[in-house]
Image: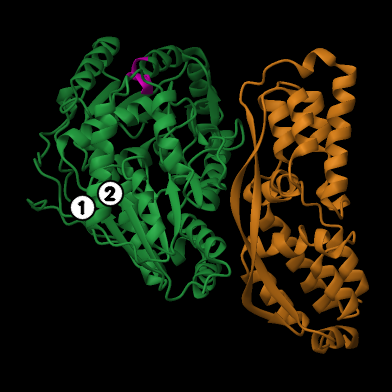
Chain colours: A orange, B green
Amino acid sequence: MAAATSTLHRVAAKPFYFNTAAYLLRITRQKAATLAELLEALRECPEESIFQHTFRTLQEHHFIRQGFSNDFAQWALSSCKEPGLGERLSAVDVREFTSVAELRATFMRIVGDFLQANPAAGKRSAQEVFYFCASDTVVIPTSFVAETMQDFAMGVRSVSVHSIHHHFIEARLRLKLMSNDFSQWLHEDMGLTDTARALNQIDIYTGTLEDVRRHIVRIVERALTAGGN
Amino acid sequence: MKPAKGISRDSAQATTKTPDPPRVAPVRVAPPERRRSPRAWETPPAPVPPPPLDNYQSIVGAAEIDELRFLARELKGKTVKMINSTAVGGGVAEMLNRLVPLLSELEVITHWDVITGGNDFFEVTKAFHNALHGSAYELTRQAQEIFLVANEQNRQRMQFNEDVIVVHDPQPAALIRARAGTSARWVWRCHIDLSNPHPQVWGFLRPFVEQFDAAVFSSQSFARQLPIPQYLFYPCIDPLSEKNKDLDDSFVQKVCDEFGVDRKRPIITQVSRFDRLKDPVGVVQAFKLARKYTDCQLVLAGGGASDDPEGAIVLNEVKEAAGADPDIIILDLPPWCALEINALQRASTLVVQKSIKEGFGLTVTEALWKGKPTIAGAVGGIPNQIIHKLTGALVHSVEGCAYQIRYLLTHPEFADQLGKNGHEHVKENFLMTTNVRRWLLLFRILLAGVR
């Protein structure tokens, strides 16, 4: 009980400011009508395109519980009818990347390996052309600021799913760490290392972003009642 | 304008009021004995005033509205002018009717000007429109002259004192020649499919387009190779419009009763003009194949047969394909029947949009918004809305459409999940509030560093 009380009344070394982000989609020059062209476009496209078709598309489709990972995988599966390649591309977990350059290299390696093993597949026309887009981003502050765990729980419950995506998924590109803004704050400014770790282990690919939000709230509430550290 | 006598426009709201009967005259409802005499209205009702931003809060959430207010704060005092070619009728005017007041409410003062021109000008621009969609056309010097003279007359008549000028579609594109005398940022918003444009017509328009600061398209595939930034704004629907707002179930029931639609049995609906590109005959064929295995009714609700000779021909083809089947209900509705269309979509078990060619396919957006499992042709902007087996079902043939009807009718849990995902997809990407956000972002990007 004493521990719970201490978590309840703990004040952060620095407050957590909830932000969110808005994106404008730009149409780029790259497009692909075959898998060979996809590989070429992956090499040439701006980093914002890799970001758009991986991190951002996950946000745009945040309501899908299973079966959607990134636009490249979806295209390989639905337009190129290559389920094996689709599965391999789907398995790329954006949380394992702290830079877009690494992410690009991974997609290029998967597509390159597939085409080396299946050269004929590279020339087959896809049902739909893949058009590369890119995102221009504006970060927006919200009115929510957390100095305590109760404030934090309130913030997580109240902000938009775009804010959850911004802090929880996209953050690692900013932080250059295998973590997220919430876990960083819980660890560094609240001293709640276990709670921070538990948050970072939430699976974002088997639920919607609303599910992720609920999961975060459950972990935070557990910390508040159990007084975890 | 004749008011819709006897019909309270509030009667269809999700309230406890008893709604009045529908105010339309369908061409045919089968079987006739199931239907009462409908009330006919010859003229459209007065337009509903656009709702304020706060009314959207219950739909998209307070956080989304706060984001719009924040994005607009930096633009406070900036002015925008939207220019298009018609104040009423058509999707662009409908969209501007909602967008302009919302931007102004956010203190981004937005004016809306409509260009004028004679019949010859609008005949030329109609031909340009068709040619840009890929139709054959011979671009004459005279047509170019008519286009340029009308644009020049409008340029001299109009003022361009705003910070951002947005020119919609090709008709006013040559107004860009006014930019030399202004400090404004100029945007070309192209609502039409430019994926396969007539080379001569596009070659004539392209030098104008290249002088804009940015172009905005409705689909990635509509963009062209241009030396200016190109942005993607999906078309959108207004969740508070008559076509999309929540309806009282008793009103939905009244509409179904009026049109002879039995809500106790599965209802498959396609809403579209009687146009071959929407493949209504293919829908009848798919329905007949599917109905061999599962009981259902088909509603084909559309318009265009009374004011378009080709529409009347297609309507006859559809009637012929339907034969005397009492479960195929064909409705030729006037264009102001948004509430009735809304009710039919809401009453549906499945919605079909089996187009062969399509722009964006806003009827798909409307169906998804209503949480309806939707089966649609994989053409135009439809694949942006329907991710196969995740937010709906994409089909490429009559047989494929028939199979998906059977599958979704016999797997209601899966169908329900598609409907829920589809609704969320629209909420995230294709609502009016998202459109407002995109414009605010574009204005901020264009005006960054401008004092």
Could you say which is closer to the camera, residue B41 or residue B115? B115
Could you say which is closer to the camera, residue B449 or residue A146? B449
* Residue B390 disc label: none
Q: Chain of mark 1?
A: B
Q: Are marks 2 and 1 in contact (CB under 8 Å)?
A: yes
How crowded pointer 2 is (Cα within 10 Å; few <14, some 14-19, many 20+) is rated as some
Left or right, B220 with reference to A57: left
Q: Is residue B41 above or below residue A78?
A: below
Left or right, A150 with reference to B439: right
Left or right, B33 with reference to B52: left
Q: Quadrant of the C terminus of chain A?
A: bottom right
Q: Dot 1 corresponds to which residue?
A: B19
Indicate the position of residue B175 as horizontal and vertical percent values: 34, 49
Alpha carbon separation for disc pair 2 and 1: 7 Å
Q: Residue shown at 84%/15% (left/top)?
A: A119
Q: Residue shown at 69%/70% (left/top)?
A: A156
In the image, the segment drawn in magenta is B276-281
Q: In what element is the residue under mark 1?
A: loop
Q: Dot 2 corresponds to which residue?
A: B250
Q: Amino acid at mark 2?
A: Ser
- Residue B292 sits in quarter: top left
Q: Amino acid at mark 1?
A: Pro
- Residue B145 sits in quarter: top left
Main SS of the magenta part reads helix
